[in-house]
Image: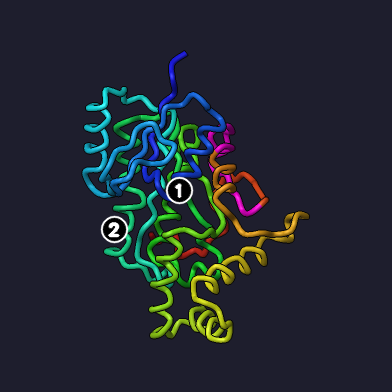
Amino acid sequence: MGQNQYLIIGGSGEAGQSAISAIRSVDPSAYLISTTTTKEPVSNSDLTLFGKRAEPGLTEAVIDDINKAGKPLEFQALIYTPALGEVGFPIEESTQAQIKETLGICLDPMLSLEERLQPKLTVAYSAFYWLSHTLAFYGSMGIAKYKADKWVLENPKNRRLVRAGTFFSKSVRGISIVLQRTMKKTNHPDLLKLKNKFESSNQKFIDFFLSYAWEHEKETFQNQFETPYRPTVRDDLTRGLAKALQNDSPITTVLGDWTWEETKLPQLPTWFQQF
């Protein structure tokens, strides 16, 4: 039997490294090809494609490098991790320009790769973008996650989504930095509430931000589980992807020790339909 190939876009980050661990656990003989924006080889990957950013032209650049390496363009799964967009304001206030720019990083390159490579599975990552605190500050990233949810449900046979709770990453640090700046000039009631809580917390903002998100996750989901809530970590993402690669459910959700499957969109405010 031949070796299964996997392509991880963004293998150096938290999601990428967790994906590599998950694939190794379910397919130990797999050949892993990972992209990175850095000049350092991706840890635990068999082949690293350097200098690859989530932007127009990514598909051709990836294909060219794989061809140069003499590897076939056949993949058991494509794992897409990039997540970058404008944040620090309510999702509902996202402009078309902001959405276009965010989709150009978070979704469009994945769609292009999926179309050209035709992997058996394409896997994206999502978040709890519809919770009250996230609605207030997730900006155009919230629209990207909403569209990823819709995307996976359009073809659940060949697509998977891993939805994860808030965990520390470079992306979350970036969101916290932008949000801290935004709070200084906001009139939005939910952001003002967050600002007041922060000012009385005596914490660094990144620590406060994580605690604030975890508090809302616990408040929303704890009554569905007997196991106590705990924050999500990299190993939970590994567990989520391992399950997504092995089951038929389009959406696998991991939140600390909790894991569940979903087959439809969450309950969303009706205004999401305009996007």
Q: Amino acid at mark 1?
A: Lys
Residue 232, located in which quarter of the rendered image?
Answer: bottom right
Image height of 95 relative to 167, above or below: below
Q: Residue at x 47, y 38 (%)?
A: 20
Q: Give the answer, above or below, for where 139 lies relative to 156.
A: below
On screen, residue 233 versus residue 7, left or right, reads: right
Q: CA distance from mark 1 to mark 2?
A: 17 Å
Q: Secondary structure at mark 2?
A: helix
Quarter of the view holding residue 26: top right
- Asked whether residue 273 is in view, the answer is no
- What residue sits right under mark 1 in the picture? 150
Q: Of the residues under marks 1 and 2, which one precedes in the sequence?
A: 2
Neighbours of disc 1 within 10 Å: few (<14), some (14-19), many (20+): few
Q: Is residue 62 visible?
A: yes
Disc 2 residue type (three-letter): Lys
Residue 31 screen position, x and y as percent: 42, 27
Instruction: Depth check: give the residue in front, 49 or 213.
Output: 49
Residue occupying the point 49% across, 68% down: 135
Q: Nearer the viewer, mark 1 or mark 2?
A: 2
Mark identifier at residue 39: none
Q: Quadrant of the C terminus?
A: bottom left
Q: Can residue 3 be found in the magenta stretch?
A: no
Closest to the observer, 203 or 250: 203
Instruction: From the top left corner, tell me how far across and down residue 245 is, in percent.
Output: 53, 34
Q: Which residues are magenta?
A: 242-256
Secondary element type, mark 1? helix
233 is higher (above) or lower (below) than 6: below
Residue located beneath label 2 in the image: 100
CA neighbours of label 2 inside 10 A, class few (<14), some (14 to 19), many (20+): some
